[in-house]
Image: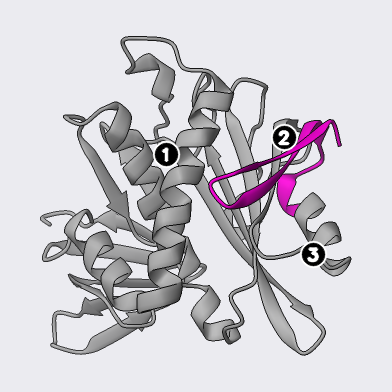
C-alpha cells in the first residue's frame, strides 16, 4: 500500500499496482476491513470482469473495489451492481451532461454506444454474514482493444483533461450518495432510476447464456434485478445472467 486517506465516507487504500483490486479487497475483507473500505490501484496485472473475462488494466484508467458490509442477506447484495452502474452514470453525466449515455443490463455503462466501464460484484462469507466486493473500472485514458464490444475512454470526450484522482473523487461522491440511498430506502428507487436510463426496454432482444438463447420483448427488471423477457408465445422468462443484444427486427 502506498497511501491511505478518507473521502466521501470511504477509507481509500491506494496502490501503484495490484493483481486485481477485487483480489486485494478479498484479502482485506477476510481480515476484517470495515464497510466502505475502497481499494484503488493505478494498474492491475490480472484484472478480471464478469463471467471470468480478463479486464485489460493499463495505467491511466480508474480501477477500484469497494468493500461493502450493509448487513443484508446474500440475495440483496447483487443489487449493488445496479447501484454501481448508476454511480458511474452519475459521474459521467456530471462531466458530460449532454452525452449519449445509457445503461445496459446487467451492469454495462455505454457512452455513445460503447462501453466505458467494467463492473464486477463478488460476495464473500465473513463470520455469520456476507460482504460484497464491488469492483468498478472506468476507462479514462485508454479504451481496451480486442474487447467483445466496442469500448471508449472518457478522456476522448472531455474538453479539458481530468486526472485519475479527479475521476476517483467524482465517482466516490456519486457512489456514496447512491449507496446511502440504497441502504436507507432499498432497491426500489435504484431500480426506478436505473430503468429510466436503461437501453432497449420494450424492444425485442436476444439473451445468450452458454448454450441457452432466449428471444423476446424486454419488459424491464424485477424487484430482485433479474431481467424480464416475454417470449413470442407470451411466456415470461426471468433471467439472472447472460449477454444481451438487440434482436434482428427489434
Specify the label residue 149 is tagged with: 1
Q: For mark 2, does the 10 Å Cα neighbourhood hold few (<14), some (14 to 19), or many (20 or more) residues?
A: many
Badges 3 and 1: C-beta atoms under 8 Å apart?
no
User: Could you tell me which residue is drawn at 21 percent across and 53 percent down?
Assistant: 197
Foreground: disc 3 or disc 1? 3
Write down the quadrant of residue 189 in the picture.
bottom left
Residue 7 falls within the magenta-colored stretch = yes
The answer to whether 187 appears left or right of 136 in the picture is: left
Q: Identify the mark nearer the N-term, 1 or 2.
A: 2
* 179 to 220, vertically: above or below: above
Q: CA distance from mark 3 to mark 2?
A: 17 Å
Q: How is the image coloured?
A: one colour
Going by the picture, which residue comes out furthest to the top? Answer: 160
Q: For mark 1, does the 10 Å Cα neighbourhood hold few (<14), some (14 to 19), or many (20 or more) residues?
A: few
Specify the label residue 88 is tagged with: none
* 154 to 102, vertically: above or below: above
Residue situated in front as seen by the camera: 73 or 54: 73
Residue on which disc 3 sits? 29
Badges 1 and 2: C-beta atoms under 8 Å apart?
no
Residue situated in front as seen by the camera: 9 or 220: 9
Foreground: disc 1 or disc 2? 2
Q: Quadrant of the C terminus?
A: bottom left
**Secondary structure beneath label 2:** strand
User: Could you tell me which residue is drawn at 73 percent across and 64 percent down?
Assistant: 34
Residue on which disc 2 sits? 41
In magenta, the rendered stretch is 1-22
Whole-percent x, y for residue 109 in the image: 37, 45
Residue 224 falls within the magenta-colored stretch = no
Residue situated in front as seen by the camera: 128 or 198: 128
Q: CA distance from mark 3 to mark 1?
A: 32 Å
Q: CA distance from mark 1 to mark 2?
A: 24 Å
Amino acid at each position: 500500500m502506498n497511501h491511505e486517506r478518507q473521502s466521501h465516507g470511504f477509507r481509500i487504500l491506494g496502490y501503484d499496482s495490484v493483481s486485481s483490486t477485487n483480489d486485494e479487497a478479498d484479502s482485506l475483507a477476510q481480515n476484517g476491513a470495515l464497510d466502505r473500505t475502497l481499494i484503488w490501484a493505478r494498474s492491475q496485472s490480472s484484472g478480471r470482469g464478469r463471467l471470468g473475462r480478463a479486464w485489460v488494466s493499463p495505467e491511466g484508467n480508474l480501477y477500484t473495489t469497494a468493500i461493502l458490509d450493509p448487513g443484508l442477506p446474500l440475495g440483496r447484495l447483487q443489487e449493488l451492481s445496479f447501484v454501481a452502474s448508476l454511480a458511474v452514470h452519475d459521474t459521467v453525466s456530471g462531466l458530460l451532461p449532454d452525452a449519449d449515455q445509457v445503461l445496459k443490463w446487467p451492469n454495462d455503462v455505454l457512452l455513445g454506444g460503447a462501453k466505458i466501464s467494467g463492473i464486477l460484484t463478488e460476495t464473500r462469507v465473513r463470520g455469520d454474514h456476507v460482504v460484497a466486493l464491488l469492483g468498478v473500472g472506468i476507462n479514462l485514458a485508454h479504451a481496451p482493444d480486442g474487447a467483445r464490444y466496442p469500448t471508449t475512454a472518457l478522456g476522448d470526450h472531455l474538453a479539458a483533461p481530468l486526472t485519475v484522482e479527479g475521476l476517483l473523487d467524482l465517482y466516490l461522491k456519486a457512489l456514496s450518495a447512491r449507496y446511502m440511498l440504497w441502504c436507507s430506502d432499498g432497491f426500489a428507487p435504484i431500480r426506478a432510476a436505473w430503468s429510466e436510463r436503461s437501453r432497449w426496454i420494450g424492444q425485442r432482444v436476444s439473451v445468450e447464456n452458454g448454450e441457452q438463447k432466449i428471444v423476446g420483448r424486454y419488459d424491464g427488471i424485477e424487484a430482485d434485478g433479474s431481467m424480464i423477457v416475454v417470449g413470442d408465445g407470451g411466456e415470461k422468462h426471468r433471467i439472472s445472467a447472460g449477454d444481451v443484444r438487440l434482436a434482428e427486427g427489434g
